[in-house]
Amino acid sequence: MTDTIKIGKSNVVVSNALGLGTNKVGGHNLFGDLKDENGYALVKEALNSGISLLDTAFAYGNGRSEEIIGDVIADYDRSKIVLATKAAHDPSRGGKFNNRPEFLKQSVDDALKRLKTDYIDIFYIHFPDEDTPKAEAVGALSELKDAGKIRAVGVSNFSPAQIKEANADGLVDIAEDHYNLVHREVETSEFPYLKENQISFVPYFPLASGLLTGKYDADSIGKFKQFSAAEQQSILKALDQVRAIADGHQATVAQTILAWYLNNPAISVVIPGARTADQVHSNVAALNVALSSSEYDQIDQLFKNF
């Protein structure tokens, strides 16, 4: 699981399949009681622990996450860091999504300043807007790729049809979407097309907002409104069996679930978030969980109905 990963048809290479999602780094508009000092500490912990891909976005604190990351990476070898960021929320339009070429180009220039770097490894269109032709939007990013400002073109939260439209000229390198063991629709709706077109895939919410960490029990049923009580009971029973596998590896349930993604051939990089440096340290330990093929298949089957 330490093999390098090539991103799509680009020249971007990630040193291992575990990255860091940074919506809790400076994302004061998304989470309460966030402290910038914790954000600085957890990004440093990630880089010091061998994580190389940092996934951020303008929407995380309206640029604050990018600013914190830019401050931190100034003390590291930039060539060993893979920066991924995103834009679509247009402040001049009340945060409405904007995929127009001129907006995306300005967003890249603005992100470069906040990140204090002269190139971004992966730049995603964060959300599709209502009217911009997707191939036109991606074409603008391709121009920036040719200019050396970005190195890989990405789309995020695009429907399967929108991904195909965006990739009309074969310019999309990577797609990021909601995917985890209890949210598996993209396995059939996106994975075959992505594989056929050499487009890498990165899932967000890999631990289902905490549901798959193993820290919840029957008393927590009802907390996760997207699932019925019966579904939550089924998930908890499945996690009990994952816990048995985890115990065999002297690992936590969360680390074992992350190890499943790290072994999934359809996934290029998994980007669990963290609020503290300790949580980053715990996530990194997933790299040491060597699931057997039978254990991988068992976990897969436990959640097959989701």
Image (tube, grey):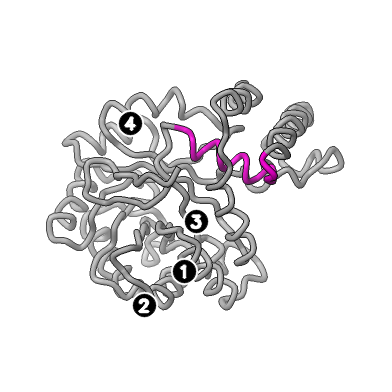
Q: Are marks 3 and 1 in contact (CB under 8 Å)?
A: no
Quarter location, residue 188:
top left
Q: Residue 65 carries which label?
A: 1
Q: Are marks 2 and 1 in contact (CB under 8 Å)?
A: no
Q: How crowded is mark 1: few (under 14 residues within 10 Å), some or many (20 or more)?
A: many
* Separation of residues labelled 2 and 4 (CA atoms): 34 Å
Q: Which mark is residue 74?
A: 2
Mark nearer the viewer, 3 or 2? 2
If you read the primary sequence from the N terminus, does the residue marked by circle 2 or circle 4 appear first? 2
Mark nearer the viewer, 3 or 1? 3
Quarter location, residue 63:
bottom left
Magenta residue span: 249-264
Q: Which mark is residue 21?
A: 3
**Left or right of 77, for residue 260:** right
Amino acid type assigned to the residue bearing label 1 in the image: Ser
If you read the primary sequence from the N terminus, does the residue marked by circle 4 or circle 1 appear first? 1
If you read the primary sequence from the N terminus, does the residue marked by circle 3 or circle 2 appear first? 3
Quadrant assignment for the N terminus: top left
Q: Can residue 142 be spotted in the picture?
A: yes
Residue topped by disc 4: 194
Residue 151 location (% of width, % of height): 23, 55
Residue 268 location (% of width, % of height): 39, 41
Secondary structure of the residue carrying tag 4 is helix
Of residues 196 and 298, the one drawn nearer to the viewer in this rendering? 298
**Left or right of 32, for residue 46:** left
Q: How crowded is mark 4: few (under 14 residues within 10 Å), some or many (20 or more)?
A: many
* Separation of residues labelled 4 and 1 (CA atoms): 29 Å
User: Would residue 218 be counted in the magenta stretch?
Assistant: no
* Separation of residues labelled 3 and 2 (CA atoms): 19 Å
Q: Are marks 2 and 4 in contact (CB under 8 Å)?
A: no
* Separation of residues labelled 2 and 1 (CA atoms): 15 Å
